[in-house]
């Protein structure tokens, strides 16, 4: 059983302790200062798309409460804040010059963070594509990659004098697959070939932006990308199960990391796609752009899964003649998202990345859990489930470090309860409770726990 002292002893000095958020999930103020609609503003209007018909119109009203929210991070003694910039605020309609009022918000946010001794970490794209770019085809269209690089440079020019760490994209798997294959996220399309084209164009946009930011950087900056990745375990040693896990790992992890680090897509994944009649729209020179060197890989981890290649009736091919792949329970307790709690999957994941992509420093850019919080009369939540989740997952990170993985920080998801996409406001991931009626913020037990760990680590109190 680890104590806070033994737990923090597993992290090297200089290790970052922080929190993360994203623009659409917290800012609100969707029409302020020239912002135009994003695909999420549109998707939230689709009947049935979001639980309770919730929208990000107000969210946590962070746009108007930013200094107080930064003070919260300061009070928790955390050293890093990862936030995303809303493309339709900075470049309304996805084209043209920078919108001074829009970038002004992030300019003030960066100054406020620095004044409080907190390192600002910018994510350029956390899913809020300007609607006009979706109307022109969205990520399945190659031009969107070039539009993204142009927008990235607008933000970069404004903030690079004070921001050292840059993430191009957050979780391109979600943008491509949830948005264009499964229709669960904006823009809500169900077109598998378009989703595969989106994978490639997201990576191309990342590479173009990385190259251009690097070329323009007047000093050493850390530029990278954040992926949501997991360990895919086979349900047994039987060949169909092993192959189902290989395919899940291929589409969830290697299809991104292989081109980013090795400069080519994995041959087995390309063959799987060909069997499905789908092809990545690669043009000459694209892979060199995508493999532009990065300084840091952001790892977002929530759960792992076990896969079988057998259907319930025992067959190994589906009605289309394609191999069966389905996830089956590992038999673990679950969070309110119905995600299984699998901390050792985190260790296995981090060690797997260190093995397959050596020399790539990692930071945990998101990790956290939703539980059905119950607040007392003061708004305080004794969130033992979330606190235990943090403890076990930090332990998993420490185990990976002890076994040689280069991991340089841990950013909890999320600073505060917020708009959880298709689940609206029902699912709460915050370490700080938000009362959406009054916008009151109250740190939960998990926030106080992370505060204690960060403080112990800072003063070197380890056992
Ligand atoms: O809330 C999301 C976040 O926007 C991206 N990563 C996963 C989180 C929890 O679902």
Image (cartoon, grey):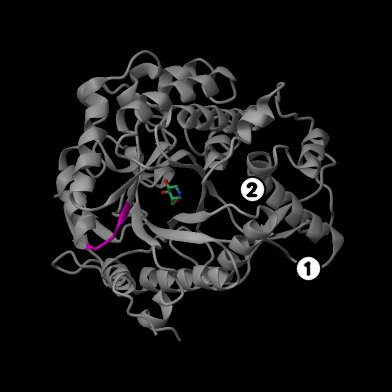
Report the magenta residues as a range: 76-80
Q: Which mark is residue 4?
A: none
Q: Does 333 sit above or below residue 125? A: below
Q: Give whichever of discs 1 and 2 has the lower sequence position.
A: 1
Q: Quadrant of residue 318?
A: top right
Secondary structure category for the residue under label 2 = helix
Q: Residue at x 30, y 72 (%)?
A: 449
Report the predominant secondary structure element of the magenta stretch. loop
Q: Which residue is mark 1?
A: 236
Task: Estimate the x, y position of residue 415 in percent, counting from the top left.
Answer: 30, 55
Q: Residue at x 83, y 36 (%)?
A: 275
Q: Which residue is mark 2?
A: 252
Question: Outermost residue toward the top?
Answer: 96
Q: Quadrant of residue 283?
A: top right
Q: Is mark 2 within 8 Å of ligand 1?
A: no
State which mark lies toward you, 1 or 2. 2
Q: Residue at x 66, y 52 (%)?
A: 357
Task: Estimate the x, y position of residue 134 in percent, counting from the top left.
Answer: 48, 21
| In this picture, residue 395 sits left or right of residue 95 | right
């Amino acid at each position: 059983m680890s104590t806070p002292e033994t737990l923090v002893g597993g992290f090297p000095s200089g290790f970052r302790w922080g929190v993360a958020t994203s623009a659409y999930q917290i800012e609100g103020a969707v029409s302020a200062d020239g912002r135009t609609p994003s695909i999420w503003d549109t998707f939230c209007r689709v009947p049935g798309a979001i639980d309770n018909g919730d929208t990000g119109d107000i969210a946590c009203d962070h746009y108007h409460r930013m200094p107080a929210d930064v003070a919260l991070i300061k009070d928790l003694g955390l050293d890093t804040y990862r936030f995303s910039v809303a493309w339709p605020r900075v470049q309304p309609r996805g084209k043209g010059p920078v919108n001074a009022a829009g970038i002004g918000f992030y300019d003030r946010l960066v100054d406020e963070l620095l004044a409080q001794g907190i390192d600002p970490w910018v994510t350029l794209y956390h899913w809020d594509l300007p609607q006009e770019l979706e109307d022109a085809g969205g990520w399945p269209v190659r031009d969107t990659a070039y539009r993204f690089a142009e927008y990235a440079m607008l933000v970069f020019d404004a903030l690079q004098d004070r921001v050292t760490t840059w993430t191009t994209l957050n979780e391109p798997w979600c943008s491509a697959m949830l948005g264009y294959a499964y229709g669960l996220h904006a823009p809500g399309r169900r077109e598998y070939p378009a989703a595969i084209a989106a994978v490639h164009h997201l990576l191309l946009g990342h590479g173009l932006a990385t190259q251009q930011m690097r070329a323009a950087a007047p000093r050493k900056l850390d530029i990278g990308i954040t992926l949501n990745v997991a360990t895919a375990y086979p349900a047994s040693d039987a060949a169909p199960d092993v192959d189902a896990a290989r395919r899940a790992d291929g589409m969830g992890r290697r299809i991104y990391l292989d081109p980013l680090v090795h400069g080519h897509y994995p041959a087995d994944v390309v063959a799987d796609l060909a069997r499905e009649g789908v092809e990545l729209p690669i043009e000459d020179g694209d892979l060199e752009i995508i493999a532009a060197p990065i300084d840091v890989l952001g790892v977002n981890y929530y759960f792992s899964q076990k896969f079988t290649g057998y259907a319930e009736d025992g067959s190994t091919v589906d009605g289309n003649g394609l191999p069966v792949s389905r996830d089956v329970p590992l038999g673990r307790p679950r969070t309110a998202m119905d995600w299984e709690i699998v901390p050792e999957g985190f260790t296995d994941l981090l060690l797997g990345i260190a093995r397959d992509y050596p020399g790539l420093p990692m930071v945990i850019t998101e990790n956290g859990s939703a539980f059905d919080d119950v607040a007392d009369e003061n708004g305080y939540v004794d969130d033992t489930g979330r606190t235990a989740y943090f403890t076990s997952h930090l332990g998993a990170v420490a185990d990976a470090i002890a076994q040689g993985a280069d991991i340089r920080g841990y950013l909890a998801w999320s600073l505060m309860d917020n708009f959880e996409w298709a689940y609206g406001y029902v699912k709460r991931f915050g370490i700080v409770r938000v009362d959406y009626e009054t916008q009151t913020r109250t740190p939960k037990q998990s926030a106080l726990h992370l505060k204690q760990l960060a403080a112990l680590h800072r003063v070197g109190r380890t056992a």
